[in-house]
Amino acid sequence: MPKYTEKDTEKYYDSEDSIYQSFWDKEGSCHWGLFKNKENNYLKASEYLTDLMIEKSGINSRSKVLDLGCGNGEVTIQVAKKTGSYIFGVDLSGVRIKNAEDKLKQNALAFVSFKKASATNLPFKDGEFTHVWSQATIYHVHDKDKALSEVYRVLKKDGIFIFDDLTKPKKIISKESRKYVYDRLLFDTPFSFKTYQEALKNKGFKIIEAKEISEHLKISYQKLIDILENKVNNSEEAKLIEKYKKLILAYGFTIKAVDKKELGWALFLCKK
C-alpha cells in the first residue's frame, strides 16, 4: 500500500485547486452535500450541510471556532457571517490559504483569520476553542490518531467537535477503487463507521451523534459528473477537457466504490 506524506497532499491541492474551483464552486467551496427533499442543486446541498452543522454544533456569536482544513475559506466566511463567531481557519495548502486571505480582504471580517498549518501540529494553546469544525478533511491527514489528539487538546472542556469524513467499510479494497479513489486522492483510512466512533471515544470524546450519509456522497459525485459532462459537451474550459474526462471516469468509480461498500461517508458530533 502506498504511503503518502503531508508534502504529497500539499502539492496535490496546490496544483489541483484551480481545477476544482472551475466546476465544484467558483467561490472555492469544495465539499460534498446533503440532498434533502429531492434537492437537485449541488451547491444548495453543500450549503444545507453547512447550515445543518451550524445548527447541530450550536455555534453562535460567543463561540471561538477552529475550521480544520478550511480550504479556500469560503465556508469559514459563511459560518462567520451566519453566526457572528470568531473563526480561525487552517489548511495544509499554501495556495488555498492565500486564496482564503484574498477572499477575507474582500469581506473585511475582523473576527476571521487564516494560517497555513498541519492538523497534526496545531499552533494553538490547550483549550483555546469552544468548537472545532471540519468538512472533508481528516481523511487526507496521514496521522489521523495525532490529528484527533490535537483536536481534543485545543478544545475547551465541554467543547464541540463537528466534522464529516470518509470511512472504509471494508479492509479489502478492489483494484479499481484503490486506483480511482484512494490513490487518486493520496489517502487511506483505518476507520469504518464503527471504528471511527471507537477511536473518538478512546481520545476522550463523548459522541452525541454519528450519522452514516454515504448515499449523499453518491449523489454528490453524480451531480459533479453531470456538471463535468455538460462542460465537456459544450467545450467549456477547452484546456481542461482531458482532465475533466479523467475526473468523470474517477467519479464514476467513486460511486461504484460506495455501492460496493468500499467507501463510506459519515457525519460526527462529539463533545469533550
Image (cartoon, helix red, strand yellow):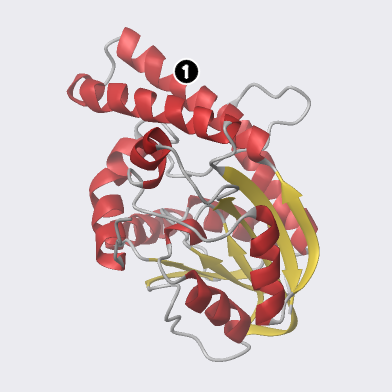
Q: Work out whether 232 lies above or below 206.
A: above
Q: Which residue is drawn at 64% across and 63% down?
A: 196
Q: Work out whether 8 lies above or below 217.
A: below
Residue 60 shows in the view: no
Q: Quadrant of residue 43?
A: top right
- The residue pinned by badge 1 equals 226
Q: Quadrant of the N terminus?
A: bottom left
Task: Spot the residue most to the bottom.
Answer: 126
Q: Work out whether 154 lies above or below 88.
A: below
Query: Percent x, y for residue 21?
Result: 37, 38
Residue 93 shows in the view: yes
Query: Percent x, y for residue 176?
Result: 38, 33
Q: Residue at x 61, y 46 (%)?
A: 265
Residue 207 located left or right of residue 115: right
Residue 158 located left or right of residue 243: right
Residue 128 located left or right of residue 15: right
Residue type at numbered disc 1: Asp
Task: Spot the residue most to the top.
Answer: 233
Query: Percent x, y for residue 54?
Result: 72, 56
